[in-house]
């Protein structure tokens, strides 16, 4: 009998990882949000927001913390948190925004979102944050279920602008530490 051991590794990426993160971001956004707006609107959004240049800027921003997860040596997911990022519905100011937790669809069955999420929580707690908040598209039941399983509660609703003509309804979720 042969057992295959699959391994993951989480690193802090730098500017040299911008292309990898842009590719994961674009692909996972299309996979999870591609049906949320017209194809031209989604393509325009992805082509503006998930560029290598955009991620070079984001990775250079010292207020944000990125983590990149490799599975069997291949990039599979990334996260981005922003410590000390208040939410207008919360009175606490020392809260962390989880701006992205993107896992490529090919890796969904590997449950890689869990260790990447736990890594973000560990970092936020080490920075003495009181909780973690995020936006999630109301049409993404898989993500909503994942976050509710982690203990997040819906605290409100907002809109996420995809284009000049289209916004998606989103929930604001909060996890108090």
Image (spheres, rainbow, N blue to C red):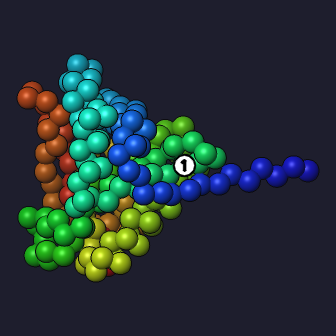
* Residue 105 appears in the picture as rendered: yes
Instruction: Examine the rendered structure and indicate whether residue 103 appears above or below residue 86.
Output: above
In the image, 126: left or right of 130? right
Please give the name of the residue rendered at 21% of the width and 24% of the height, measured from the top-left corner: 44
User: Going by the image, does 35 lie left or right of 116?
Assistant: left
Numbered disc total: 1
Residue 58: horizontal and vertical position, in percent?
Answer: 25, 47
Residue located 23% across and 54% down the image? 61
Looking at the picture, does residue 140 appear above or below residue 43?
Answer: below
When the figure is inspected, residue 127 is found, relative to residue 64, above or below; the finding is below
The residue under the point 14% across, 67% down is 86
**x%, y% of residue 10?**
50, 57
Most distant residue in the right direction: 1
Q: Quadrant of residue 45?
A: top left
Secondary structure found at label 1: strand
User: Residue 31 placed where, x, y %?
Assistant: 40, 33
- Residue that sits furthest to the front in the current view: 16
Q: Position of residue 78 (x, y in %)?
A: 41, 50
Dot 1 corresponds to which residue? 70
Rendered-image quadrant of the C terminus = bottom left
Q: Is residue 72 above or below residue 43?
A: below
103 vs 144, nearest the viewer: 103
Query: Label 1 crowding class (10 Å Cα cut-off): few <14, some 14-19, many 20+?
Result: some
Residue at 22%, 61% (x, y): give it: 63
Inspect this view and state whether residue 154 appears.
no
Return the residue nearer the eye: 34 or 50: 50
Q: Which quadrant of the figure has residue 16?
A: top left
- In depth, the one of 138 and 80 nearer the eye is 80
């Amino acid at each position: 009998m042969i057992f295959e051991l699959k391994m993951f590794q989480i690193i802090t990426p730098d500017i040299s990882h911008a292309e990898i993160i842009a590719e994961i971001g674009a692909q996972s956004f299309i996979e999870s949000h591609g049906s949320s707006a017209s194809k031209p609107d989604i393509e325009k959004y992805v082509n503006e927001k998930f560029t290598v240049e955009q991620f070079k800027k984001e990775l250079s921003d010292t207020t944000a913390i990125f983590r990149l997860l490799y599975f069997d040596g291949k990039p599979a997911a990334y996260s981005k948190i922003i410590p000390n990022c208040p939410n207008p519905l919360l009175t606490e100011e020392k809260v962390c925004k989880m701006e992205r937790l993107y896992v490529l669809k090919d890796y969904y069955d590997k449950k890689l979102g869990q260790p990447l999420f736990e890594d973000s929580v560990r970092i936020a707690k080490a920075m003495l944050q009181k909780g973690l908040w995020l936006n999630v598209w109301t049409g993404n039941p898989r993500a909503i279920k994942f976050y509710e399983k982690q203990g997040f509660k819906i605290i409100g609703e907002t809109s996420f602008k995809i284009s000049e003509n289209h916004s998606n309804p989103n929930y604001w979720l909060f996890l108090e530490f």
